[in-house]
Each structure stands twice: as structure tokens, then as C-alpha cells.
Image: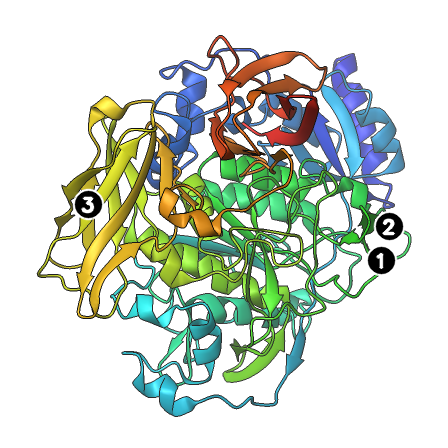
Amino acid sequence: MNITTTLILFLSILFSSITAETKYFVYFKDKGIDKSTLLKKNSSLFIEAEKAITQKAIERRKKVMGEDNYITYEDLPLSEKYLQQLKNLNVKIIHKLKWLNAVSCYLTDEQFEYVKNLPFVDKIEKVKKLKLIRPTYDEEKISINVNLAKSSQLLKYGLSYKQNSLSEIPVVHDLGINGRGVLIGLLDTGFRWKNHPALKNIKVIAEKDFIQNDSITENESLKNDAPNQDRHGTAVLSIIGGYDEGNLIGPAYGSQYILAKTEYVPTETNVEEDNYAAALEWMEAQGVDITSSSLGYNTFDPGNYSYTYKDMNGETTIVAKAVNLAFERGVSTFTAVGNEGNSDWGAKYGDNSYGKVVSPADAFNIISVGAVDTSNKVVNFSSRGPTYDGRIKPEILAQGANVYFAVAGGTYAYGNGTSYATPIAAGIAALLKSAYPHLTNYQIRQIILESGDNSSKPNNHRGYGLVSAKKAISFPNLENTNNRFTLNKIFIHPIINTLKPVFIYYKAGNDNYQKAEMNYDGKLKYKFVFPETLQGKKISFYFIYETNIGQLREPENGTYEFYYGSLLIHHNVYSVKDTANFEEVHSDYYLYNNYPNPFNRETRIEFYSVDNAYAELIIYNYLGERIKTVFMGTSLSGRNTFYWNGENEEGRNVSSGVYFYVLKVKDKVLAKKMIYAK
């Protein structure tokens, strides 16, 4: 027996005899190859990483990452050599997290001291103890107009009518759109769905328990699950996808589902942060389109490490990092903003705003959901923003008070919490994806925000407002086919005259409007292919169509806008002369908040000018270096709108990070901060 083998055997015996263990993340320095190694498409590393994800995941990734870059260094498996060395030391590995290049594992104090000095180990951190956003339950029934619920739509929603109608979901169901073709992943406490009348026919294609490490997500008494362990997850599943006509119908009752049990209910002295990250990796690899979680992590049981409000910056917590990586791979991500509205959690931000956001609601590009009551008023318990780095939270709102749901075991009840608003919003995203399978997660996020009732003036109280399925489905969207951009539109108007044509009026820049007839598929959708000659130009457009009460214009005020080459459409209510009465007038030069922020593909930057003054709009990095001159010239009187796609003066993409956009006009210098997240 050689010396190395003897040493490993000795250490293994020593470490196995010590029982005091703590759970840690062990981060590796590399994956057996340097991070700068070029991943060629036909290389063995690329092929191995590709085999670990489904074809559905590959196709989703290609839409946002490109045909050749859909596998990255983060997707490579962990080094088997490094894993084996940990196993030789009798280290108990729980989860292998390739995105983070880490494992979660139990270490004794002696193992910790030895492992941290291994040459391939970068660092070791404790796995944080996490807290579930706890809802409240109310068995008392609320009074609604049941006759209306049974007669005004094709489906009978029963006591779930109010939560659906508040976000204008029934009218979309009436079009035959129910989430079919969409795969949704739910991360929660567990799911008891097989025998409940609202859930027994739901299409669950996979489920996994990341606590017990098996494929059973309902309660397992032999494994010491708490009696109410699977109650919350069952409720969430029913809110988004249940179907028991006359009792409960969820917005995405036609979707398929992947279920992950990640939360241990009895105490907050649990270790779910690594469960969440592992579950997201698993779901993404299965090809999930949308994920929804009702979790929020900040304070934990006494004696455990807690995050602070300063950590709610989108990139510190493990759960936020995991969400960011899932979004980069094309997944639409939703989460509850938190129930901390009445708590001491958070910190004062500015003169009168208190940040109470919990993670992963702070993640970049995630859609965090706040709660309103049945009259569309924000409830007191709903957390408000901003994040520590100043981003608006929540993004949108849905009903989170007196939400009707299925109770594990066969009955129904009401409950309150942002965790019950979230599945409604995620279900609306599923309706949108079902109607338009070509949409990327960037487009879905943009459209969902544009469909809020506060989208023109978002704030940290209401975000972009109450989300509307009707507005989301009818918001125009683009499809890129061989660099030809097709505009898609559904008109949800009860008296639109489909026998008469719908016209689009469009223009490039300051050109005159052109008129064209849209193509109708005879059922639901209208299409128009923009001329390729518009490449690189800002396009403004609106629609005119006939109804039984006369001619209508959409949007009623302003125009839709996009840059040819971008898939993101914005509704600008200040674009055309006939909306002058809606112009936001300032008495001085004014620089608006960019939108979206943070951004990945493109962000809109606007400033207001009181006259036709010479102005410069310039992007700087954190070091004060000039990155891009967005505009230099004579400004228009009123709003001036520009877009930045993250490129510098040489046309190369800049790195992720904090940037400043600065307006110089006359004796004024105005600046604001934005975040570019590739």
C-alpha cells in the first residue's frame, strides 16, 4: 500500500468517526479545464454537456443564446477527479451544482480545515438557513356573484371567479387559450395532487423531492414529513393549473407541470438554499418554459446566518444567482415579492421608501409578484421595493387576498399571501407562451410588464400594476424568421368586424406613416411582415379596425415602438401629435429612468427638453470612462427617446455591470444608474 492510499484511508476513517457536521458549499477553482477554454460545438466537452439537457431545453436556449453558444462553461459537469477526492475523504455530497461549480455537502470541523486547503478548492461557504413566505388561511367563504361566474364566460369558475376575472383571464380562456404546449416548473413545499378533483387530471410529467432525494413530492410519513408539509404547494398548483368546473379553474389548466419539493415546513432551521438551486438546474435541463416559486429568504432561525437588505442586490444570494442563470438560458422566472410589508425587515431607502424585498425576488429579470385585494388595492403585507441597488419591485400585482385554492386531501379554502398571487401571474405568462410559442423570455417579461395597469409610471408600491391576461394576449409581438420581422396581433374586442380589414399604420423615424392591410388567419391572429429596408431604424405603428360601433384605433393613445432588429416592443403614449394632451410636461430638462433596468438586450433612455437645445446623451462605465455616445445634436421640444443595446463605440458588447447615462444640456448635467446583465 503506497503512502497516498494510506493517507486517504487514514483521513477517511478519522472523518467518518466524527459526527458534528455542518452543511457547506464547496466551490471549485475550475472544472478540470480553465474557464477560458474555448467550447467548440463539436468538442467532447460540448457534446457531453449537451447530452445532459433535453431537446426542448436546447431549442429554448437557442432562441436567446444563439445557434452556437447555447452551451457555456457553467453547463459543463463538475470534475469527477475533484468529486472523487472529496468522496475519498468520506465527505457526504448532497447536491452537485454545475452552474455554480460547487457541491453542497456536510463537513466536520476537521474536514473543513482539510478541504479548504485542497489545491482545487476555491472557497467554502455555509449553506444558508432559509425561510418560507408563510401565507394565512381562512376557511370562511367570501360572497361573489356566482350567477355572473356561471353565465358570462364559457367556463364555470365557481368561487375562483374573482381571482381570475380581476386579471381578465376568462376572456382569454374563451378564445381557446389555456396554456397548452407550455411546461411550467413549480418549486414549493410538496404536492398532493393525484386524488383531488381539481388536480387529478393535471398533466404532471416529472416530480422530485430535493429534501428526501426521491421522486415523491406528497407527504411521506415514513420519512418524517410534517402533516401539513404539502399543503402550500398543493394550493399553488391548484391556483395556477387546477380544473374542477363549478369550483375552481386555474389560468394555465392546459399546461404541463414539473414539480420540485424544496421546502421543509416545520422550522426555518433547514437548508433549502441548495435545494432551490439544484431544482432550478434540474427543471431547466428538462426544458421548462416558466418557473414559479413562492419562496422568500431573508431572516432565519436564531443562531443562523441571515442575509441583510444590502444583499438584496440581485447577485449575492445563491437563489438569485441560480435564477439569473436560468433566465440567461431562456426560462421565464416568477416569484413572490414577499409578505414583509408590515415587518421590520428591510431598510429605509430615500426619504419615504422602505425596501422590503426578499430573495430571489431581487434577481435580475425575474418577475416578482405583489398582492392586491379584490378591489385592486395593494394589501399591507405585500413587500415593496426597491432592491438595494435601486430597482423597482414588485414588477406586477395579482390578487393575493382571499384567493381560492384546493386543500390537500380534497377540500377547498381561501388564503392570503404574495405566494398565492404569483401562480396567477405565472399562469398568465403560460397563456401568452401558449398563444405565441415563438416568444422568448425577454419578450414575455416585456409584455407582462406592459400589460400592467401602472405601466406608464411604475413605482415601488404597485410596480407596473395589476397584470391583465387580456392586455398581454392582445399586446403586439414580433417573430424573427431569417431576419424578416413578422408582427403578430390578436384583437380582443367583442364587436370587431372580422369581415373588414385591419390596417397597420407604420413609419420609420420621422418619415410619414404608411398604411398596409394585415393578414388574417380566419380564426384569431393578424400578421404583418415589415419591409427589410427598415433594418436598424426605429419603427412606430398603430392599428385601425372596424367594429359594430364604428372605427377604433389601437393603442387609443400614442404608438407602439421598436427598433428593427430588436424583438421588444414598447407602448409609448407620447409619440404622436394627436396625443399632445397626454404629454408629460416638465418645467425644466428632465432625465427619466431607463426601462427595462436591469437589461440584457436593450434598454430605453428618455429625456425631456423644454426647447430645441443642443444636448448630449452619453454612457459611462463605473470608472467614468466614456462607453457610447447615444445622442449628440439638437433635441426635440418634449420627450426624446433613444435605445442602447449594450455596445460600445466599436460595436462590441460591453461586460455586465453598472453603467451611468448622462445628459448634458446647456448648463445642466443629469445622470442616472443602470445595470447591464448579459
Q: Point out the residue furthest to the top here.
A: 650
Whole-percent x, y for residue 514 in the image:
20, 36
Quarter of the picture holding the N terminus: top right
Q: CA distance from mark 3 to mark 2?
A: 56 Å
Q: Residue at x 53, y 81 (%)?
A: 409
Callout 2: 10 Å neighbours few (<14), some, many (20+)?
A: some
Residue 23 in view? no
The circle drawn on residue 527 is 3
Q: Point out the residue furthest to the left here.
A: 499
The circle drawn on residue 301 is 1
Secondary-structure class at tag 1: loop
Secondary-structure class at tag 2: loop
Mark 2 in CB contact with mark 1 (< 8 angstroms) = yes
* Kind of residue sitting beneath label 1: Asp
The one nearer the camera, 609 or 81, is 609
Viewer-nearest of discs 3 and 2: 3
Quarter of the picture holding the C terminus: top right
Q: Point out the residue furthest to the right here.
A: 303
The circle drawn on residue 137 is none
Q: Residue at x 40, y 28 (%)?
A: 50
Query: Which is more N-terminal, label 3 or label 1?
Result: 1
The quadrant in which residue 417 appears is bottom right
Q: Residue at x 82, y 28 (%)?
A: 11
Residue of label 2:
304
Residue 471 in view? yes
Judge whether 463 appears above or below 675 on screen.
below
Q: Is residue 677 left or right of residue 85?
A: left
Viewer-nearest of discs 1 and 3: 3
